[in-house]
Each structure stands twice: as C-alpha cells, then as structure tokens.
Amino acid sequence: MRPAIDGARLIARLKELGETGRDTEGRLCRLAGSDADKAGRDLLCRWMHAAGLRVEIDRIGNIHGLWQPGGAEGDPVMIGSHIDTVIDAGIYDGCLGVLAGLAVIEAMQAAGIRPSHPLALVAFTNEEGVRYAPDMMGSLVAAGGMEVAEALATIGTDASTLGAELARIGYAGEREPGFLTPRAFLELHVEQGPVLEAGALQVGVVDTLQGISWQRVTIGGTANHAGTTPMALRRDAGVAAARVVTFLDRLARGTAGAVATVGTLRLAPDAINVIPASAVFTVDLRNPDDACLRDLEAALETCLDELRAEGLAVTTEPLARFAPVRFDPGIVATIEEAATERRLTWHRMTSGAGHDAQMMARVAPSAMIFVPSRDGISHNPAEFTDDSALVIGADLLLDVAGRLCR
C-alpha cells in the first residue's frame, strides 16, 4: 500500500498559517523580518519539532528541518518554498510548498518508510522581496549568488535593516547558508496563472522558468505652468514615461513568450496644474529565452536613447536580473512518470513567476510541480486552489520525493 498525504491535516495547517500574521485591517501581511513573519515562523517550527525534525536556522534566516532516520546517508533530498507574503496576500503562495514538504515527511514516517537518503524541509527567507530587495533572497544566498553580509545589510522600504530585524525576531541563525548540499530540490507551488485551469489539467510539470530583468528608470523634464506653457515648448517627464509604458506594451505583445510590466510610477511635483519635472518607474521584463530577454533590454535602451536625444535626462538603475532556468530533465521525467502512474492529466510548462527553485537549480538538480489556481489569481486574497487539487499535488510530491531518496 503506497503512503499517502494526510490531506485533512495539510489543509488545516494551510488555513491556520493563513490566519497567522494578519494586520489590523485583516490583511495577510507576513513581510520578511516582521512580527507577523515571526508568528508564522514560530508556528512552522512547532510543527517541524512535533514531526521529530532537527530544526536549524542559518544566518539569513532560512529554516531547515532535517529528517535522517537510521540508515539514511549522504546529502538530503530537499523540499521547500517560503512562508513570507506580499501585502494583502492569499494563503497558498509558497506556504503550500513548505507545508506539503512537511506532510511528505510525515507520510513516510507514518508508513514506516526508511529512505536511503535524508530528507530536508526548508522555508526560505524573503522570497517575495516586498520589504527587502531582491526577491528570492534566502535561496539566492544559500545558492551562493549573494554574499550573506550584503543580504543582511539590505535596507528595507521602511528604512529597517534585514539583519537587525532577523535578530530582533529571533531568526538570525548561526549556520552558514548552504550548509546543506541537497542531492535534489523539489518545490510544489500553486500555478499563479490560468493555464492549468483553462486546459482542465490537474498538474503542471515545470521544466523551465522565465528570465527576469528589473530596472528603475528616472526621467527628468522641466516643471512649468500647465496653463501657460505651449505644448511644443514642454519637456514633460510624465508624457515621456507614458511613451515608454506604451512602447513596452507593444514590444511584449509582439515578442513570443515576452511579458513587460511597469508596476510603479511616481511623478513629481505631483500637482494637477504643474508639468511633471520627473518620472520614476520600474520595468519588469521576462522571457524564457535569455537571448530574447537581452533583445528586450536592448530595445528598451533604444527607446530611452530617443528620449535623451530630445533633451530629457534619463538614467537607469538595475535592480535584479536572473537568467532563465531549465530544470533537471531527469527529475522532470520522474514527475511525469509519477503523474502518469496516478492517471493525472498533466502538461509541461514554463513558470512565469520567479521561485526559490530557480536559485537552488544553481547548486542541485531541481524541478517544480504546479497545481491549478482559480482564475489564475495570486498575490491577492482571492487566491484559491481546491482542497482536492492541493492534496493531489502533495501526493505527487510524495511519490517523486520517495523515488529520489531511494
């Protein structure tokens, strides 16, 4: 008899964690290093200790739970994701991957399985990047892509320092990030998009992950009276920003696999009757092909050069750049085989969002499993996945982890 996930316990934990860390307005808001983050971490650690895991915290605050039953040797199969959230979040993003990983270990324990290799559960710090940039920070540091001292010195949107906040909430650990070298890394996640639901598919087998390029653009014009300055004599930073926004929209719509987003925009002096003297905005470019991503970046720079030629002062600041990821073909095939054996409907797909697995792919064979998101909604209280779909994904994760740790 094959082991099975305790679905009722998994769903109950998701809901309990989903009620942990809400603000005075009732919004789920577990930003990295906050009191709400501490509450979620404390709850997770209690569950991990109850499952008999050896819990260890590294210097960037990543939480690890190691299960090494007698006879299990070598590097662990690692499962995990994150429990920090955006502002006014849903309850599934990241949390499913962590709690399903815990459920996998408990299912093996209940079935009396003694794997050949240890299993490790991990909850990475600051995956969302809302309070501290860049996102996916904990896994990036663990994979050696960012120095721990640099990460700990990061200044947040509220002028706090990540290292000080981790110490304040009791999660500035002593282990060096990356102290565990996984033999494989697995992450179960809600899709956060509409593909699986639209295709009536139960599972997404994620074999690639889009490259991401973030920049901040500042355009300087000339503030002047909105009523007395003729249109031909204006240097309007707001109009220039709008031109860039519409250019990016056309560019992405005309480029296979591309998406482009201007998610923040600030005009100054921000007065109804004053021509904007400056515009500051962010650009998020994504494509699963790195050459295409570079082409998008170059096209943006050409657009900005045209503004410079018109006398506008334009500067750019790189915020983050992650190359596209191709996940391990062997693990991808193992997921497909396990899904087929369970007679699930599945589809190979690219992830449009960034995930901790893309960082861990730098140091270990990695792959991801997606389950459907209703209406493709995420980063929103309306984020929802049916309980049955959550359990299907967790059972598939159990199958794959079991094969990898034999």
Image (cartoon, grey):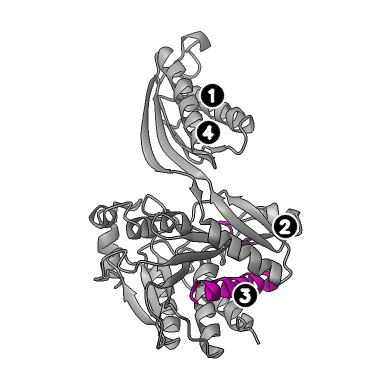
Label 1 SS: helix
Q: Earlier in the sequence, mark 1 or mark 3?
A: 1
Dominant SS in magenta? helix
Q: Are marks 2 and 3 in contact (CB under 8 Å)?
A: no
Amino acid type assigned to the residue bearing label 3 in the image: Asp
Amino acid type assigned to the residue bearing label 2 in the image: Glu
Give the label, 2 or 3, closer to the camera: 3
* Marks 2 and 3, how far apart at CA: 19 Å
Label 2 SS: helix
Q: Is residue 51 left or right of residue 171?
A: right
Q: Which residue is mark 4?
A: 292
Work out whether 325 lies above or below 266: below
Q: Position of residue 135 (x, y in %)?
A: 41, 52
Q: Earlier in the sequence, mark 2 or mark 4?
A: 2
Q: Are marks 1 and 2 in contact (CB under 8 Å)?
A: no
Q: Which residue is mark 1?
A: 243
Q: Earlier in the sequence, mark 2 or mark 3?
A: 2
Q: Earlier in the sequence, mark 1 or mark 4?
A: 1
Label 4 SS: helix
Q: Nearer the viewer, residue 22 or 123?
A: 123
* Marks 1 and 3, how far apart at CA: 49 Å
Q: Which residue is mark 3?
A: 395
Q: Which residue is mark 2?
A: 197
